[in-house]
């Protein structure tokens, strides 16, 4: 029997975002940022900023937040501070899960024991890891409850991904996808949808077997779309692209939080969300990568109950209705309903394509059109930080 939780989980929220560091003149990736940059960033943000696998990446992590307003304040402060520090070194911050035109084979990975081990073990597969993401931690203190909710919440992962898509370009080419990031990430081992476990003990037996075999050092080497954090008592949603617009990030984080509480409410009433096979959820995962939240004859996700493809906007309305009591409980109704605005004006991926196509129509070369995309991404990452042309 799954362990019970008499007391409702805290459902605290934490957000991690990964960004590109770009040269302000070329807008290409800063493949070897000055060592003093990270030192200066840490002097202002402490442990809330850290290096990532690629030297051209930087990661921020919020403090534990108990409201959407707190999370917004955290991200606003960290983004603007990091942008200010980067400017001292003639760099800019760019939030998108792939850079519009950068080449992976020109990059260097960060020198450190963890990163060197990953580079040695995964070889060229990890050399191509020129991607950024957003992770949302939801505080759920009970071990068994985390495992139980992880299995049910997997259903919603494609829906969350579709709201965040920001990686339509790869190496200067339009991929035809709303997010190409997962096509790169899925080449790594231990990625994709999480396994279904009956208890925390069962989950730990599987992880410990890999540790004992010397395959992984700890649970942080499980890179699933949703996983129990190995460091904190949280469920960590990892499927999302990094959002170019800060308000989009707050929206997706708030929906994630509300979905977890909705599932907990079902449990409290002796109900549960149906656990669908990974085969079915994986199909929606692909559809989210290909079509995102955009409308269209072939777009949308599968409604498993009806066994038919439903427009994404309709599915979001159903989710908003499901989580309305939780959004009211957390005071984040406006934040979750921002999903409608994302659908109306499009995610970062759609807007990147619009900028590119508009530039081409006005006579720009493909290279100049990609520069226009990069400029807009920089401006939207931290409004007011754009590069004057």
Image (cartoon, rainbow, N blue to C red):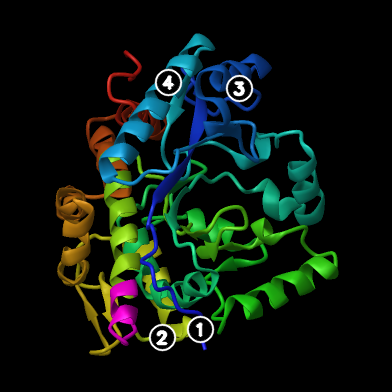
Looking at the figure, which quarter contains the C terminus?
Answer: top left
- Mark 1 secondary-structure assignment: loop
Sequence-wise first label, 1 or 2: 1
* Percent x, y of residue 383: 28, 25
Return the residue nearer the eye: 191 or 269: 269
Q: Can residue 9 be seen in this view?
A: yes
**Residue 113 to residue 143: above or below:** above
Magenta-colored span: 264-273
Mark-to-mark CA distance, 1 and 3: 44 Å
Q: Name the residue under label 2.
A: 276
Mark-to-mark CA distance, 1 and 2: 19 Å
Q: Are marks 4 and 2 in contact (CB under 8 Å)?
A: no
Q: Name the residue under label 4.
A: 81
Sequence-wise first label, 1 or 3: 1
- Mark 3 secondary-structure assignment: helix
Instruction: Bin the neighbour count of mark 2 within 10 Å (Cα to Cα): few under 14, some 14-19, many 20 and up.
Output: few
Residue 241 shown left or right of residue 302 in the figure: right
Is residue 270 part of the magenta span, yes or no? yes
Q: Do the residues labelled 1 and 3 touch (CB within 8 Å)?
A: no
Sequence-wise first label, 4 or 2: 4
Q: Residue at x 63, y 27 (%)?
A: 31
Q: Name the residue under label 3.
A: 38
Instruction: Bin the neighbour count of mark 3 within 10 Å (Cα to Cα): few under 14, some 14-19, many 20 and up.
Output: some
Q: Which-is-in-front pick, marks 1 and 2?
A: 1
Q: Which-is-in-front pick, marks 1 and 4?
A: 1
């Amino acid at each position: 029997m799954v362990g019970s939780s008499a007391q409702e989980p805290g459902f605290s929220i934490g957000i991690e975002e990964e960004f590109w560091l770009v040269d302000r003149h070329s807008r290409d990736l800063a493949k070897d940022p000055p060592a003093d940059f990270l030192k200066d960033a840490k002097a202002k943000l402490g442990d809330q900023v850290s290096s990532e696998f690629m030297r051209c990446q930087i990661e921020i992590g919020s403090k534990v937040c108990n409201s959407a307003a707190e999370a917004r304040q955290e991200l606003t402060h960290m983004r603007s501070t990091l942008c200010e520090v980067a400017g001292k070194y003639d760099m800019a911050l760019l939030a998108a899960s792939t850079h519009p035109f950068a080449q992976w084979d020109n990059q260097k990975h960060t020198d450190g024991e963890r990163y060197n081990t990953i580079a040695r073990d995964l070889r060229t597969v990890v050399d191509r890891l020129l991607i950024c993401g957003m992770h949302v931690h939801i505080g759920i203190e009970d071990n068994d409850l985390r495992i139980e909710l992880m299995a049910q919440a997997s259903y919603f992962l494609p829906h969350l991904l579709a709201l965040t898509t920001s990686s339509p370009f790869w190496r200067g080419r339009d991929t035809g996808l709303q997010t190409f990031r997962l096509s790169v990430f899925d080449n790594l081992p231990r990625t994709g949808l999480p396994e279904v476990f009956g208890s925390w003990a069962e989950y730990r037996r599987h992880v410990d077997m890999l540790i004992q075999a010397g395959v992984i050092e700890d649970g942080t080497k499980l890179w699933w779309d949703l996983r129990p954090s190995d460091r904190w008592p949280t469920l960590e949603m990892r499927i999302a692209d990094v959002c170019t617009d800060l308000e989009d990030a707050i929206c997706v984080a708030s929906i994630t939080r509300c979905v977890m509480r909705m599932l907990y409410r079902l449990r409290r009433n002796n109900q549960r969300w149906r656990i669908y096979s990974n085969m079915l959820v994986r199909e929606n995962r692909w559809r989210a990568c290909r079509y995102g939240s955009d409308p269209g004859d072939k777009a949308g996700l599968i409604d498993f109950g009806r066994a038919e493809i439903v427009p994404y906007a309709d599915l979001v309305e159903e989710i908003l209705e499901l989580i309305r009591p939780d959004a009211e409980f957390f005071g984040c109704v406006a934040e979750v309903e921002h999903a409608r605005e994302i659908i109306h004006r499009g995610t970062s991926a759609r807007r990147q394509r619009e900028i590119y196509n508009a530039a081409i129509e006005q006579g720009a070369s493909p290279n100049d059109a990609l520069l226009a995309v990069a400029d807009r991404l920089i401006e939207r990452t931290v409004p007011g930080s754009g590069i004057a042309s």
